[in-house]
Image: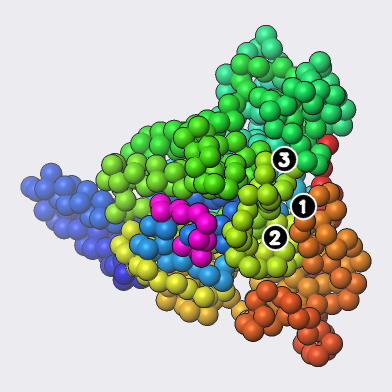
Amino acid sequence: MIKPIKNMMSLKSSLIVIFLMLIISCKNKNSENIDAIDVLQAEQQKPNIVFIYTDDLGYGDISCYGATSIETPAIDALAKDGIAFHNAYATAATCTPSRYSLLTGNYAWRKKGTGVAPGDQSLLIDTTRTTLPGILKTAGYKTGVVGKWHLGLGGLNGPDWNGKITPGPLEIGFDYSYLIPATGDRVPCVFVENHHIVNLDSNDPIQVNYKEKIGDWPTGLENPELLTLKPSQGHNNTIVNGISRIGYMTGGKAALWDDETIPMELVDKSQKFINSVKGQPFFLLLSTHDIHVPRIANKMFQGKSNMGPRGDVILQLDWTVKQIMNTLKNQGLLENTLIVFSSDNGPVVDDGYHDQASELLGNHKPTGGLRGGKYSAYDGGSKIPLIIRWPDGTGKGLVSNALFSQVDFLSSFADLVGVENVANDVIDSQNRLDVLLGEDKIGRTSLIQESFMGPLSYLEGSWKYIEPLNGPKLVPWGPVIETGFQKTPQLYDLKNDPKEQTNLAENFPDKVKEFREKLMILKKDGFTNKHEVELN
């Protein structure tokens, strides 16, 4: 069990002190004593942590969470050997705020401007604040992030694409980074390694603009005949690899990624990071592009799911998990590595391209039957799959219904690695290590969810309160997803009504009043993001 291991670590620390005292008193056995210390230090090594953070994967998109139209054996194996959490939440129904919360331990709505970030956004995380990688780094970890970033890069004026791109991940606690700067459907379509664009030719500088067209590269709006994948809404700006994106770019042709090999590139860089770490524990955040749009599966997976590109990239995601697990196993690291698998928000089917995701969905239910989806205030927006595989088999095969929020990883991992004092700038993260170990069956008392236009939901126990907002009933730019916005308060009993069908606000006015007041207290001195979706 991990808990005894944690307790044993303090015991081993005492033993080290005793051994050091013995070394001082036994001068004629220096080499033997040094060897003994090396053995103890090796035994004391903290677990490696690999966090596989997927994009737009729904609660019902994988077979270990009930999907029957598609099989995800590698992800299922994690659940079989670990703990599957069935009451876990991202902090928001969109990616940027969820990722901000994961790394900072704070709800993103406390910081102005943390809605979905444009592709040329400056770094959203203050370089002076406490972060998850920063805490792990102080505990002796080598830290790396590979994949989708979408938290901004550069100073107040945004990134200098043709120079040193800073600040970024390396300034908030990561030792290594290999990034998709924003999203796959936003320019620039290049990788950034540490502080520089990969393979950038100085004679062909990159220009990026999110307000007006620059250069002479064709766009989806002007040259639809050049498209291999046509947009369904927005996404009609600069064409890269036959796909029109959000935003305009020109230059940097040698640096452009190949959409079909993005997963292979991210796996390769992850493997190289894992193999490069010697003599210390490591933390790898592998932030996959799958299953975000544009959904361009590698030839290995095209047509294999019978559900079109969206299903194919779910299979591709499962392949990614398998490759990482094989790497850890082949390097003899699996017995000392904690694996986390989760998603940044709920699913969306049609999210900007004609990829037949809706037409070929069949009986598959990406949200697992939950109401809403990505962007929504309903549970389909932020209730996500979460699987944790402990290296010593703790909780093997367990299904946990404890309430958990991704904002808690910072404080929970701080406890795991022995960081006793987390700075006061971490407001919302709670130490829920006992939940992650499967020991606490209840979890959080309450949590907050953020939807795409600002209204927050307060969840306490099995009850959920959604703030009133006079807004659109459906996501206004195309996806057929309920926003969850109503002019009057909403109250749902999730225990008896997990699909949020019956609004009980009028039946329980005292509870509505209580939850509204609790939410107001928690929101004090905080901003609420009003996200305006940027499609063009």
Residue, x 80% and y 32% (percent of image)? Answer: 236
Residue 393 percent across, percent down from the top left:
32, 64
Q: Give the quadrant of residue 229.
A: top right
Residue 373 is labelled as 2
Magenta extent: 64-75
Q: Nearer the viewer, mark 3 or mark 1?
A: 3
Q: Which residue is mark 1?
A: 479
Indicate whether residue 71 is drawn in magenta: yes
What residue type is disc 1 on?
A: Pro
Quadrant location, the C terminus? top right
Give the left or right position of residue 477, taking residue 27 as reference. right
Disc 3 is placed on an element classified as loop
Q: CA distance from mark 3 to mark 1?
A: 12 Å
Residue 329 percent across, percent down from the top left:
30, 46
Residue, x 72% and y 40% (percent of image)? Answer: 354
446 w.r.t. 81: above or below: below
Q: CA distance from mark 3 to mark 2?
A: 19 Å
Residue, x 84% and y 87% (percent of image)? Answer: 506
